[in-house]
Every structure is written in structure tokens, then in C-alpha cells.
Amino acid sequence: MPEGKNIYQRVNAVMQEVNYIAKGEKFVNGQYRFVSHDAVTAKMHPVLTKHGIAAIPTVREIKQEGNRTQVQLDVVFVNIDNPQDAFQ
């Protein structure tokens, strides 16, 4: 159980469990494969919650260019047992 660990120890525990997320089979313009948001979320969410880490996103900027959307986020990682123990 993560109780008593600080946020850095918790993140280290997550890193020990999740060391790679594979690219999908879908190609963009026949040129390259990518790791989807859904793949990252599916892999990371259960491990972050297991180790008592909340990831709090804040949208900094959104740009729309044709069919391409770019979003800049700030994410704060919070120790759920001690919310003052956090980093961005």
C-alpha cells in the first residue's frame, strides 16, 4: 500500500510497473505509428490510482488548425494522502 510514501516514491513505484507503452498498429498518412491517448490512459490510470496519485490537468492553450487540434496542458501530480505533496 502506498501510505506513508511521498509523491516521488509513488511516482517511482509507478515507473517500476509501467516502463513502456507500445505504439498502436494504425499508421498516420501511411508514415508512422503512434501511442494513442486511450492506450496511455488505459495503462496509466489503474497504476496511478493503485499508488495513490491524482493527475490534475489544466488546459493552458488550445489551437485549431484545420482538422488538427493542439492542446497544451499543465499536469499536477498529487499525493492523495497529503495533497500538499505535489509537483508539476
Image (spheres, rainbow, N blue to C red):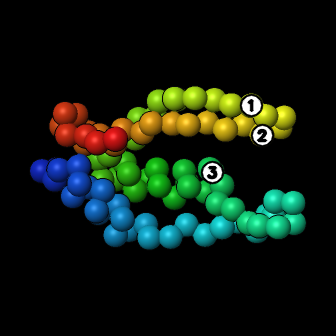
Tell me the crowding category of disc 1: few under 14, some 14 to 19, or many 20 or more residues within 10 angstroms, Cα based.
few
Q: Is residue 86 something one can see in this rendering?
A: yes
| Residue type, mark 1 in image | Gln
Q: Are marks 1 and 2 in contact (CB under 8 Å)?
A: yes
**Residue at screen point 42% across, 39% down:** 75
Residue 31 lies left or right of residue 63; in this view the side is right
In 3D space, how far apart are the residues under numbered discs 2 and 3 (Cα atoms)?
A: 18 Å
Residue 63: where, in percent of width, then height? Answer: 68, 31
| Residue type, mark 3 in image | Asp
**Residue at screen point 54% across, 50% down:** 41
Residue 28: where, in percent of width, then height? Answer: 81, 59
Residue that carries the numbered disc 3 in the rendered image: 38
In 3D space, how far apart are the residues under numbered discs 1 and 2 (Cα atoms)?
A: 6 Å
Residue that carries the numbered disc 1 in the rendered image: 64
Mark before the other along the chain sequence, 3 or 1 = 3
Using the image, determine if residue 15 lies above or below residue 61.
Answer: below
**Residue at screen point 29% across, 63% down:** 13
| Residue type, mark 2 in image | Arg
Residue that carries the numbered disc 2 in the rendered image: 68
